[in-house]
Image (cartoon, rainbow, N blue to C red):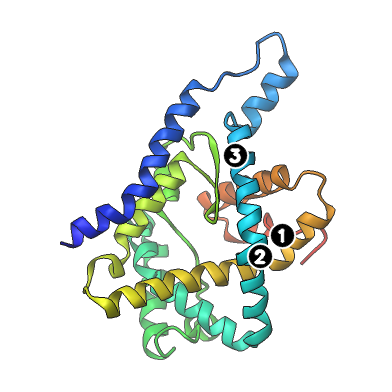
Amino acid sequence: MRIVKLASFLAPKLLPLAALALLAGCATPPPASDAEALAEFRATNDPLEPFNRAMYATHTVIDTVALRPVAQGYRAVLPQPVRTGVRNMLQNIRTPIVLVNDMLQGQPRRAGDTLGRFVLNTTIGLGGLFDVANDHFGVPYHNEDFGQTLASWGVGSGPYLFIPVLGPSNARDLTGFGVDVATQPLTWFGQGLAVDIIAGSVAGLTVVDLRESYLDTLDEVTRTSLDPYATIRSASRQSRAAAIQNNDAAARAALRPAGSR
C-alpha cells in the first residue's frame, strides 16, 4: 500500500522529467561558425532556456501571489529564535536522507557527524528544536542529497531546469529529489490522516522556511539585476558545484548577494 502511495506521489514529478529529458536531447546548439554563441551555450548548459524562462515567469507569479507574502508574514509573526527552532527541527527530520547519502558517497566521517548530531539534537535538543550538536559540540549541520551522490558517482548534471516552486535544478538533481522523497521515513512509516497531516505540515514548513531564508537575497537580485533569471542560474550552479565538493561555506556564500556577509 505504501509503495502504491509512493508511486502516485512521485509519478507527477518524474514524468515531466522524462519529457524534459527528451526535449533536451532535441535541443539544437548554435552553428559551429558562431563561436561566441556556441561557447555561451556550452557554458550555461541551458538548451531549454525559452522553456525555463517561461517556467521562471510562472514561478514569479506564484511567488508574488503566495510564497513571498507567506514568507514575509512568517518572518513578521514569529521572532528569530522561534524560526531558528523550526529550521533546526526541519534539519533534524531530514537527517535520514543526509545520513544515507553520506554513506553512499563513502564519507564515514561526515556520516558519523550526521548520526551524532541526530542523537544529540533529538535527545538533549528536544526533538531537534535546539542545535546542541553545533552550539555546544562544534558539529555543524551539512546537507547531502541523492543528486550530490549521483554527482560523486560521476553522473553528469544534464541540462539546467527551472521548476516552479522547486526552483533551479537539472535532470540529475530532479531525479535525486524523487529518490530523497522515497528515503524520507515519513513516506513509509505509518498511514492515515494523522501521518498525512504531519507529512504535509513538514513539507509546507520546509517551503516557507526556505523561502523566508532567501527573502533578502532574492529581493536584492530582483532590485539590482538586469536579468534575475540568469543571475539565479549562475548563483545556483556555483552553489551546487561547491556543495558537491562538500565546501559548505562556499555553497552558502554563492547564494548571498554581492557585498553581503
Q: Position of residue 49 (x, y in %)?
A: 62, 33
Label 1: element kind: helix
Number of other residues with Cα within 10 Å of mark 3, as a class: few under 14, some 14 to 19, many 20 or more = some
| Residue at 36% in and 52% down | 178
For the C terminus, give its image quadrant. Answer: bottom right
Q: Position of residue 50 (x, y in %)?
A: 63, 33
Q: Which residue is mark 3?
A: 52
Residue 137, relative to residue 58: is it above or below?
A: below
Q: How far apart are labels 2 and 3 at the CA level?
A: 20 Å
Query: Which amino acid type corresponds to the residue marked 1 in the rendered image?
Result: Leu
Q: Position of residue 8 (x, y in %)?
A: 27, 54
Q: Which residue is mark 1?
A: 218
Whichever of labels 2 and 3 marks the residue nearer the N terminus, that label is: 3
Label 3–label 1 contact, CB within 8 A: no
Label 3: element kind: helix
Q: Which residue is mark 2?
A: 214
Number of other residues with Cα within 10 Å of mark 1, as a class: few under 14, some 14 to 19, many 20 or more = some
Instruction: Report the number of discs.
Output: 3
Query: Which amino acid type corresponds to the residue marked 3 in the rendered image?
Result: Asn
Left-right relation of 60 to 168: right
Q: Quadrant of residue 16?
A: top left
Left-right relation of 70 to 121: right
| Residue at 69% in and 67% down | 215
Q: How far apart are labels 2 and 1 at the CA level?
A: 6 Å
Whichever of labels 3 and 1 marks the residue nearer the N terminus, that label is: 3
For the N terminus, give its image quadrant. Answer: bottom left
Number of other residues with Cα within 10 Å of mark 2, as a class: few under 14, some 14 to 19, many 20 or more = some
Label 2–label 1 contact, CB within 8 A: yes
Q: Position of residue 22 (x, y in %)?
A: 42, 28
Query: Which amino acid type corresponds to the residue marked 2 in the rendered image?
Result: Tyr
